[in-house]
């Protein structure tokens, strides 16, 4: 799936080892500026480039100020 050298359905430039990202601009070593969802034949998956984090949601309306006292 991700470790294939050929581009597949889950391959995107933002996960390629040849692409670097600075301030939201993705730059490929071979093609220059690229779209984060683009794909080319030089795609090679970089497992450390995948930076998906869950949004942290804390609903504090269910707590009392006494809950936070020691």
Image: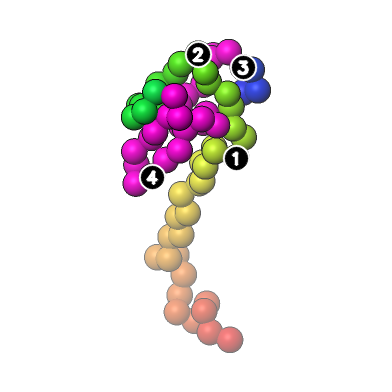
Q: Which residue is mark 2?
A: 41
Dot 1: element: loop
Q: Is residue 24 magenta?
A: yes
Q: Position of residue 45 (x, y in %)?
A: 59, 27
Determine whether, in the image, residue 21 is placed left or right of residue 9. left
Mark 2 crowdedness (10 Å alpha carbons): few <14, some 14-19, many ≥20: few
Q: Which mark is residue 5?
A: 3
Q: Which residue is mark 1?
A: 48
The CA span between labels 4 and 1 is 16 Å
- Of 33 and 70, the residue lying toward us: 33
The CA span between labels 4 and 2 is 23 Å
The answer to which image quadrant residue 20 occupies is top left
Q: Which residue is mark 4?
A: 22
Residue that appears at 52% across and 79% down:
68
- Of 29 and 17, the residue lying toward us: 29
* Earlier sequence position, callout 4 versus callout 1: 4
Can residue 11 be seen? Answer: yes
Q: Relative to 28, is 58 above or below?
A: below
Determine whether, in the image, residue 22 is placed left or right of residue 5. left
Q: Which residues are magenta?
A: 5-30
Dot 4: element: strand
């Amino acid at each position: 799936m991700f470790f294939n050298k050929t581009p597949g359905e889950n391959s995107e430039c933002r996960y390629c080892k040849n692409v670097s990202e600075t301030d939201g601009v993705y730059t490929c070593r071979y093609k220059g500026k690229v779209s984060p969802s683009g794909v080319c034949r030089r795609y090679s998956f970089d497992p450390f480039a995948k930076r998906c984090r869950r949004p942290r949601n804390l609903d504090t309306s269910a707590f009392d100020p006494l809950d936070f006292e020691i």
